[in-house]
Amino acid sequence: MADEFFSTGLKAIADERPPGRLQRAWKLLRRQRKALAGGGIVLFFLVVAVFAPWLAPYPPTEQNFVDAMQGPSVAHWMGTDSYGQDILSRLFYGARSALWIGFASVALGLLVGVPLGLFAGLRGGRIEWAAMRLVDGLLAFPELIMAMAFMAVLGLGMTNVIYALALSFVGPFARTVRADVLQVKSRPFVEAARLMGVPEREVILRHVLPNIASPILIQAGMRVSIAILLGSGLSFLGLGVVPPTPDWGLMISEGRGFISMAPWMSGMPGIALAVLLVGLNLLAEGLRDALDPRTRGEGA
């Protein structure tokens, strides 16, 4: 009888769940104007990127030297560059490059960093020490310097930019996950699940991951804007996307030599990049306010 009562109590603790967490977060997110504004901006650029072939008035790499460096007009709403390429069309296709680099690099960083942090936090001991020394090595250099070093080894191109940025994000993701796992694994419902003999895989999937998902999602949202900025920076320095592929950083770099004669060459992609980054940051802040109880003054 006592064993049955003890098992029932353990099961109740192991099945403990914060009620309605996702529903509360969604309601809080909808109430925040900055999150809605940021989401609207990001959605606009996503639509532009997806439908670029239908929205762009000209092919993005079509050159016409007769119309080179023409200012904004009815034929070319945002002007042309030094090759006579339509800047508006290149902006639409450049949104594809920016968003793909941002989301793909963060996804790959998560794919490596989250398991590494989970493994280190759950196993402990020498395994944790070795994993964290690896993470410390990755975090010893600024992300741009790290990405530049990887690009020097991997070579130019959009795919290599994604790999380089993903590698530079592994360390921050792994450290965040490991810190959260150390807090969660000592909670009563995790210990109760282990005492009941629940397999380790099920403990991770049912109890650990759901309780560390919020900080992972918040950091991932913030990292997307950082990835886009770093990707554009690499292209600006000539270490990223290769011409004639449309890329905002590359467009800014190409236009800097004509800034006094044709400011729209650098100005238009610069404005597009700034607006997208503002939208992503507003959305990330909204996610943080909605998902992190500490920002609302609630208990953890």
Image (cartoon, grey):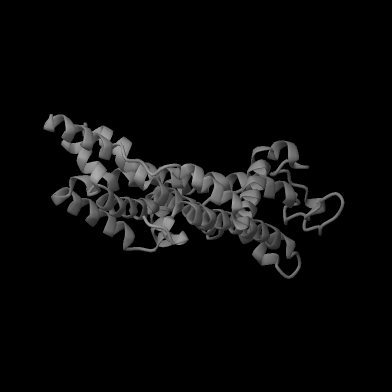
Q: Look at 54% across and 55% down and name the residue there.
A: 286
Q: Quadrant of residue 137?
A: bottom left
Please tell me which residue lies in front, 123 or 47: 123
Nearer the observer, 190 or 180? 190
Q: Is residue 193 left or right of residue 284?
A: left
- Residue 56 place in picture, x, y as percent: 74, 42
Does the rendering let one see residue 159? no
The image shows residue 286, relative to residue 188, as above or below, that is below
Residue for point 50% across, 46% down: 24
| Total tally of numbered discs in the picture | 0
> Is residue 94 toward the left or the right of residue 292 in the image?
right
Check the image and name the residue furthest to the front. Answer: 1
Q: Nearer the viewer, residue 152 or 170?
A: 170
On the rendered image, what quadrant is the C terminus found in? bottom left
Whether residue 28 is visible: yes
Quarter-of-image position of residue 179: bottom left
Q: Is residue 251 left or right of residue 25?
A: right
Q: Residue furthest right?
A: 74
Residue that appears at 78% across and 51% down? 65
Residue 280: give x, y in percent of width and height. 57, 54
Query: 191 or 149: nearer the eye?
Result: 191
Residue extending farthest to the bottom is: 260
Q: Give the quarter of the figure containing the N terminus.
A: top left
Q: Position of residue 299 (x, y in %)?
A: 38, 57
What residue is at 54 percent from the left and 44 percent from the top? 100
Picture coordinates of residue 216, whole percent (x, y): 40, 49
Q: Quadrant of residue 272?
A: bottom right
